[in-house]
Image (cartoon, rainbow, N blue to C red):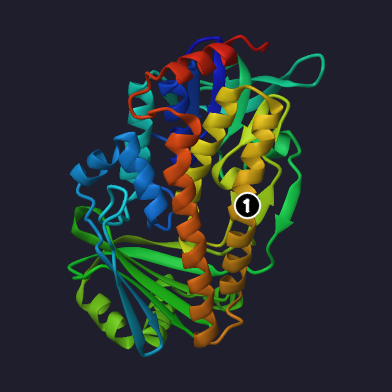
Amino acid sequence: MHSHYDAVVVGARVAGASTALLLARAGLRVLVVERSAPASDTLSTHALMRAGVMQLHRWGVLDRIVAAGTPAIRKTTFHYGAEAIAVSIQERDGVDALFAPRRTVLDATLSSAAREAGADVVHRATVTGILRNASGRICGVIITDTKGVMHTVKAKIVIGADGARSSVAKTVNAEVLHEGRHPSAVIYGYWQGLELDGTHWHYDLNLAAGALPTNDGMACVFVGLRPERYEAQRLGSFDKLFNEVLVEVDPDLASKVARAQRHGKFYPFAGRPGFIRKSWGPGWALVGDAGCFKDPLTAHGMTDALRDAELLSNAIMAGTDDALAKYQSERDAFAVEFLDLSDEIASFDWDLDHVKKLHLRLSKLMTHECDMVRSFDDRYQTDLKGGSATSQINQAATFASLPG
């Protein structure tokens, strides 16, 4: 760890590690600070949508995720009560499958790639303070390591990628621009011996469930429910509540899960409403859940994080406030509608025909998102995988010349 960097990224999960990877490949001096241990687990929806897989493929890290035993998903089935609609994953943009990696795999892969690109990645350390210069601009951080030693690090920009409860967002008093009203509660776990032909998403009145193939031959199975029921019954047993909901949503899936072997504990999430925060200011920016969080039933958070990491890294390389403002406006062009749709699905105030229509709207929005991701190379005229384009070198020199 040095005393000066171009960028300090707080958080080494999907958003933070991806942002650090792209900035480091572009030639910036980057420090990533993560409070958890390397390759540690965290709450996750697991699912990567096409746009996210496209980015991982282009960055050259998808092969590593596959090599870690992440199964390819070539079919997804939506169940609306007794109706099942199967969708095959078509080959486009170098992607012929979707994936649902454990965070122990995805986060670790992205962090390793960032380190290989030249970023300093420090785990088991906490940002305990934010530095400001005489004009009030953010200019660095104070880091406390596991021994309690404090380190002062200066930076031209501090990036909060530290989740929905972001300490960076709190410190800079980032304004909430848009807010949802409906959280859903979720409980999930892992099972061995549950044979799946792809991902399965189940919806019934007031309830949801899903099953996704993931690493180590296991399946992640979740249930979603109204938070009122979760709060009323969670003091008993997560096992009991999970099984009750799963039987109500789909007895056949519940029977298959009962015959499989559960590994580890249940992972509960009591829910929280989604939000969009102002995500840039003098010397700071937010990315991932720190800047935009939405209900997990739409399973789009990791794909959001990858998309926004690329938007933000290119804005930072441009080195202007106008570019950072554009980052936020481009993000919000998707984020606002995504949040509103996620919020409506999380409300459970729908019948099966209506939730099907909401999913069709989500599908159209994700198609536009793929168009944006497809355009990144053309818009910035750079090969982020190689990291050697002249435009990147020029932008890095421009950013490095900025005061900070």
Spot the residue most to the right.
135
- Closer to the camera, 307 or 229? 307
Residue 27 at x, y = what percent? Answer: 45, 16
- Which quadrant of the figure contains the C terminus? top right
Q: Is residue 195 above or below residue 11?
A: below
Residue 237 at x, y = what percent? Answer: 44, 73
Q: How busy is the neighbourhood of tag 1: few (under 14 within 10 Å), some, or many (20 plus)?
A: few
| Image quarter of residue 168 | top right
| Image quarter of residue 62 | top left
Residue labelled with disc 1: 333
Q: Is residue 363 above or below residue 9?
A: below
| Image quarter of residue 74 | bottom left
Q: Is residue 3 above or below residue 339?
A: above
Q: Please name the residue shown 61% across and 82% down the image.
A: 349
Position of 1 compared to 290: left or right? Answer: left
Q: Is residue 291 visible?
A: no
Position of 61 compared to 127: left or right? Answer: left
Under circle 1, the secondary element is helix
Circle 1: residue type: Ala
Q: Please name the residue shown 48% across and 25% down the image.
A: 23
- Closer to the camera, 240 or 257? 257
Q: Please name the residue shown 39% across and 18% down the image.
A: 118
